[in-house]
Image (cartoon, rainbow, N blue to C red):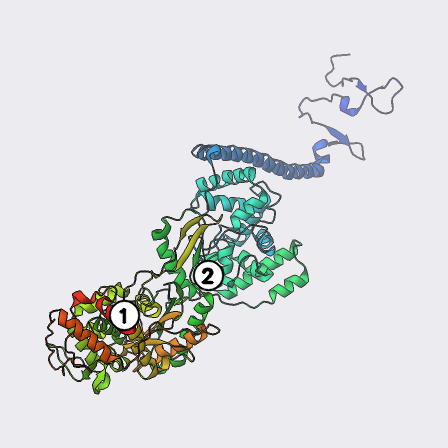
Amino acid sequence: MTGNSDMRRIEPSFDAPGRSDNGLSLSEEDRVLPTKGKRKPNSSSRTSNGRAQPASRKRGTSGRKAKRRGGLFGFLRGMVYWSLVLALWAGIAGVGVVVYYGASMPAATTWSVPDRPPNVKIVAVDGELVANRGMTGGQAVGLHEMSPHLPKAVVAIEDRRFFSHFGVDPIGLSRAMVENVVNRRLVQGGSTISQQLAKNLFLDPSRTIERKVQEVLMAFWLEAEFSKEQILEMYLNRVYFGSGAYGVEAASRRYFNKSARDITLSESALLAGLLVAPSRLSPARDPQAAEARSQLVLAAMRDQGMIGDSEMASAMSAPATRAPAFWTGSEHYAADRVMGELRRLIGDVRDDIIVETTIDLNLQRQAERTIRAIIDENRDKANASQAALVSMDSTGAVRAMVGGYDYATSQFDRASEARRQPGSAFKPFVFMAALERGLFPDTIRNDQPVRFGRWAPENFRGRYEGPMTLSEALAKSSNSIAAQLAMEVGPESVVESAWRMGIQSDLEPNASIALGTSEVTPLELTSAFVPFSNGGYRPEMHFVRRITTEAGKILYEMSPQRGPQVVSPHVVGMMNAMMAETLKDGTGRNAAIAGWPAAGKTGTSQNSRDAWFVGYTAKLTTGVWFGNDDGKPMNNITGGSLPAQAFSRFMASAHEGVPVAALPGDWQGGTMQRIEDVLRAEREREPAFPVQPVAGDGGYGHTGSIDRPLPPAEVGRQNGGRIGSIMDVILGN
C-alpha cells in the first residue's frame, strides 16, 4: 500500500455470491470509497447505467409504507397498553372502594334475612278469603305453588341469566351500559334479581356508590347462603307491584281478584312487566301501558324458549283492562273493621295469622248488590248517593256490613264510623221505657199538637189523628205521642234504656231525644235492636270468631254467650207486637218479608237528610241508612221508602230456604182488664207515684183509666222488674 489518498482500501466480505467454495467475497458495500470533500453515504446501489444510487431513494416508497404501518399498529399497541393500565388502576380503585365500604358493614356472619312483614289473612265463616291485610297485603306463596308462568316471566324480563350467574351479571351489566349510552338516557338496569332482593331486604333506595357496593356484596352473600329457587321465591313474595301491592299474591288479588296460584300466562306477563316501573305501569293507572309492557315480556319468553309462538299469540290477544283504583268489594269494609280490633284482641301482630270472622260472604254480596241497585235505580230522582247496611244474628255476630256505595271509590265506613240522626228509628227505646213504667201497647194517648217550653214537636206533614193506642202511635210514627212519652218517663230514662240495649254514643237527655236528635252509627243502632229479636238478651256485637297462627295455634276465640238479659221477655213481646204493626199497617209496609214474621221501625231526620229502617226476624236484625256524605237533603226520601225497600230485598234473599220462626213474645190485645186488676192490687200496697201533666196533653188515662205509672224502684228496668212479675201472674208463669 502506498500513501496515495485516492487509493481505495479493500476489506474482506463473507458469504458474498459468486465466490469460490471458501465463501469469501467482496461487495460494493464492503468497500471504503474516498470521502475527502464529500459526505459519506449510508448506503448506495447501482443504477442500470452503473452509477451509484443512494439507499434512501431506493427505499423511499417502502419506507413510507412501513412508517404508516408502524404508526397504526403503534397507536393500537398504545391503546391496548394504556387500556390495560387504566383497567388495572380501575380494578385497584374498585377493590379499594369495595374494601372501604365493605369495612363499614357489619360482619357477614351477623347477616340474616329479615322476617317478611306479617300478613293477616281474613276469612269468612266458610273459610273463603275476605281480604289480606298488613304491610304486604298478601300471604307468602311458595315457588312451587304459584302459577308456573310467573317465575319464568320474571326471569325472562328481569334477569335472563339468573340461573347461571353468581349474583352479579357482567354481561347483562355491559349490555345495559351500551344501551344507556346509545340511547343517551337510562333505559336498562344492570341489577340482577339477587341484587334487587338484597336492596329490598337490607338497603334504602338511594342511588349512591356506597349503596351499590353494599348491594353487590349482599347479593354475593345471598347466592352463597340460599339456592336460586329460594332467592327467586323471596323476591317474588316481597317485591312491589304497584297500587299498594307487595308480593305476587297481593298483586294477583289486587289486579285480577284471584290467587297467584291461578293466574294465566298473560296475567303473569303483566305482573312481570310491572317491576320496571310499578307505579307508572299499574293497570289501575294505565292499562294500555301495562299491556304493552306485558307483550315485551311475552316476546322475551318466546325468544328464550319458555313459550311457543302459539302460546305467545294467544296471550297477546287478551285485551287490556283497567284494574279498580283501589281494593274493590264491600267485604273490605268488614276487613278494615277487623283490623281495627286486632290490637284489642291479641296485641301486636308479629307473625302471619288467620282471622276467622262472622261474615257470610253470600249475605255480604247480596247486601252490596241490594244497596248498589237501589241507589242506581233512584240516584237522580232521590238525590241519594250513599247507603249503609248492617246485618247480624241473634248472637251479635255481624253477618254482613256494607259501608258505602263503592269501597274502591271511598273507604270511609259509613256503617261503623258515620254518626247520623236516627230520627224516628230511635222511638222504640222511648216506647220501651214507657212499657217498663207500666204502660201497654193498647194504652191510649192523644195525637195532638203539644209544646214543652219553647219546643213544639210536629208530626210529619202536620197531620194529627187524635186518641190512639201506643201500638198505633209507634206504627204511624207519631212525633207528638213519642214526645209526650219521653217527658212522661223522663229523658234520662230514655237514654238509660237506649244505652242498656246497646247504644254506645253519647246521648243528650233532653226533650227532643224522643225524635232521635242525638247521633248514632248504623252499626250500634242495629245492634241495639238485637235484644228485641232474641227475647231480651244483649250479646256482644262481634266480627271475629277465632284468631290462629298459620300453624294452627289459637290466639283468641270468642266464647259462646247470649249476654245479659237487659229487658223483660214480656216487654220484648209487647214491643215486637207493636213494631210488627209498623210493617203491616204503618210506615214500614215496604219492608214486609213474604212469609216471615218481622218487625221494625222507620226513621227520617229533618229535611230528609237521613233515612233509616231497622228491623228484624227471629234470625237476623238488619239496619239500613240512606243519605249523602255532605248532609244535603234527599228528595222527600223517608225511612219507609228506599231503606224499607232495601231491607225487604235483602232479608227476603237472606231467608230463602230458612225455616220460618216466630218472633219472641206472645202479647195479645184484650187482656187489659186483667192487667188493670193486678196493677190496682199492686197500688193498694205501694204509695202513689205522682206524675205531673204535660202542657197540651190530653190526659194519661188509658182504657182502664189508670193515670199513673209504677215507681221506677218497683219496675227494675234491668230485668223487667215488677212488670215481669205481673205478667207472670197474668200468663200463669
Q: For residue 426, which numbered disc appears in the image?
A: none
- What residue would you read off at disc 1? 728
SS of the residue under disc 1: helix
Q: How many marks?
A: 2
Q: Nearer the viewer, residue 138 or 206?
A: 138
> Which residue is situated farthest in the right direction here?
21
In the displayed structure, 503 sits above or below 168; it is below
In the displayed structure, 141 sits above or below 281; it is above
Q: Position of residue 333 (x, y in %)?
A: 39, 63
- Label 1 crowding class (10 Å Cα cut-off): few <14, some 14-19, many 20+? few
Q: Amino acid at mark 2?
A: Val
- What residue would you read off at disc 2? 125
SS of the residue under disc 2: loop
For the C terminus, the image quarter is bottom left
In the displayed structure, 301 sits above or below 490; it is above
Q: Position of residue 51 (x, y in %)?
A: 77, 32
